[in-house]
Image (cartoon, rainbow, N blue to C red):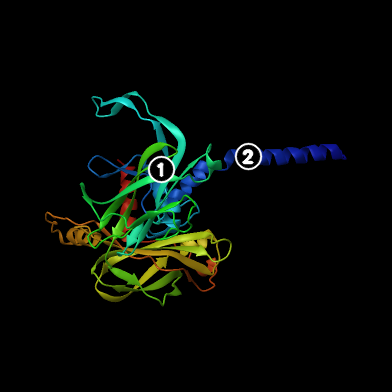
Amino acid sequence: MKVPKRLIASLAVAIVLIGVIAYFLLAPSRAQREQAQRESGSQTEPGLRTDENGMPVIDDDPAAHLERYRKWAQYPPNSRPLFAGQVDLLDPYNAEKNPVYVVQTPAEGCSANAQGLLECAKKAVFSDVECKLTPERYISIGTKDFHLYLSCTSKKQNEGKPLAIESIETKFYRQLFKNIIPSLPPIAVGDDGANGDEKAGDHIYTITVRPTSQDWGDMFLEAEFKVAGFKHVQRADFFSTPHKTAEFQSGIRDANRNGQLVVSVPVNVFKAGYYKFDANLVQKEDDHQPVASASWEGDLTPGAQTIDIQFFGKVIKDQKLNGPYVVKNLRGMRNNSPVTPSMLKNAIASGKPIGPQQHKEPLQEYMEPYAGDYSTQAYRADDFSSDEWQSEEKDRRIKYLESLGTN
C-alpha cells in the first residue's frame, strides 16, 4: 500500500516537534548548567557548609553527595576546568564595584531597635546621581604611586556623562584587624591630566596615594565631596604589600609530562615562607577561550626557585580545546598566617599540637603579578591523559562518604 506524501510529511513534522519538545524538557536549564560549571571549577568540595564551630557539614543525602563528590573529584583540587563566568579567576585583581547612589534627603529619627538594627522614622531619599571610587586594582605592591578614580553620573544631567565634582577632601587609612590607623594623605587629587590622571577635564578625578613602608595590609581611602549640589562620602579599599617577598623571573618553560601540562616558572624568593601560586590557561586563538586553572603551594627558602604549576591532563582533554595555549594571570602570595598549611600538616603527622600563637601582622603578602602572558607549544587536547585524579586523600573521602550511607 502506498503511503500518501501528505501523511509522510505530517509524520516527519511530528517527529521533529517531539524531538524539540524532548530536548527542552530533558536538557538542563541554564541555572543547572551554571551550577555544574561552578562546582566543576571550584577548588573546594561542593555541597559542604560550615557550622557555628567552623566544622564542615553535609546537607545532601549521603548517596547524592557521594555521587556529587565522585564527579567533582575526577580532577585534583589544585587544577580545575575554567569557564567564562569565573570572573574572580579570569580578572583576579579587578577592584571595580557597583556605583553608589548619592543621598538627596538624609534619613531622620533613626535609632537602634532591640536587635541592634537601625530603624528610622523617615527613610533617606536618594537622587539619581551615582558615584564610583575605583582603585586601579585590588593590590598595591611596593611604595610607588597608586591611583584611585572618582566619577559621578546622572541619567538626567550632562547627557549621562561624568559630572563636575567639587570640594574633594580625602583621607587615607590602614586597617589592621580592628584598628584603624591614619596614613599619609594622598599626594594629588585632580582632573588636570597630571599625577596619573589620563585626561584633563573629563570629570574623571584621579586620587594618587603613595603607600609607606608601614602601610602593609588592608587600606582604604575616604573621599568627601560635593556633586550636583549634594554632599557625599564614599570609600574604596585595597590591599597593600609595600615590601618585596619574591618576584617572577624570565625563562618560563612548558612540557607534557606523563600526560599533564607542566609550566615551569622561575621565581626569586627574598623571604622564606609558605607560598601559593595561581595561573590560568586559555586558548591562544578563539578569543582566549578559558581552559583550566591551576595552583601550586608549599614552603620556599630564599633564593632562585622553579615552581612547576601542573594543569591536569584530563581537565584539558575533557574541555576539548586545542592549543597552543596561553598562561595568563600568573600571580603569587606568601601566607603570613601564624599557622600555615604545612605547619598544620606536620602537627597532624607528628601528633604534636600547635601552641598558642600571637600575631600582629597582616595574614598575606602579595607579589607583583607576572608581566604579560606566556604561550605554550601547539599541543592538542588529545595529547593529554584521560586518567582521573587518584590519591589517598580521595580514597579516604570516598570511604567516609560511603560509610555515611550505611549508618
CB under 8 Å between discs 2 and 1: no
Q: Quadrant of the C terminus?
A: top left
**Residue at image location 42% in from the left, 71% down from the top:** 263
Q: Which mark is residue 64?
A: 1
Label annotation for residue 137: none
Secondary structure of the residue carrying tag 2 is: helix
Q: Residue at the left extreme?
A: 355
Q: Earlier in the sequence, mark 2 or mark 1?
A: 2
Query: In the image shown, does 151 or 135 lie closer to the viewer?
Result: 151
Residue 196, picture quadrant: bottom left
Judge whether residue 99 can be spotted in this image.
no
- Label 1 neighbourhood size at 10 Å, few (<14), some (14-19), many (20+)? few
User: Callout 2: 10 Å neighbours few (<14), some, many (20+)?
Assistant: few
Three-letter code for the amino acid on which mark 1 is drawn: Ala
Residue 17, image x and y in percent? Answer: 70, 38
Question: In the rendered structure, which amino acid carries the disc numbered 2?
Answer: Ala
Q: Indicate the quadrant containing the N terminus: top left, top right, bottom left or bottom right.
A: top right
Question: Is residue 80 or residue 67 the one in the foreground?
Answer: 80
Disc 2 to disc 1, how far (Cα)?
A: 25 Å
- Residue 95 screen position, x and y as percent: 40, 52
Q: Residue at x 15, y 58 (%)?
A: 351
Tell me the SS state at disc 1: helix
- According to the image, label 2 marks what residue? 22
Give the x, y percent position of residue 100.
41, 40
135 to 60, vertically: above or below: below
Q: Residue at x 58, y 41 (%)?
A: 26
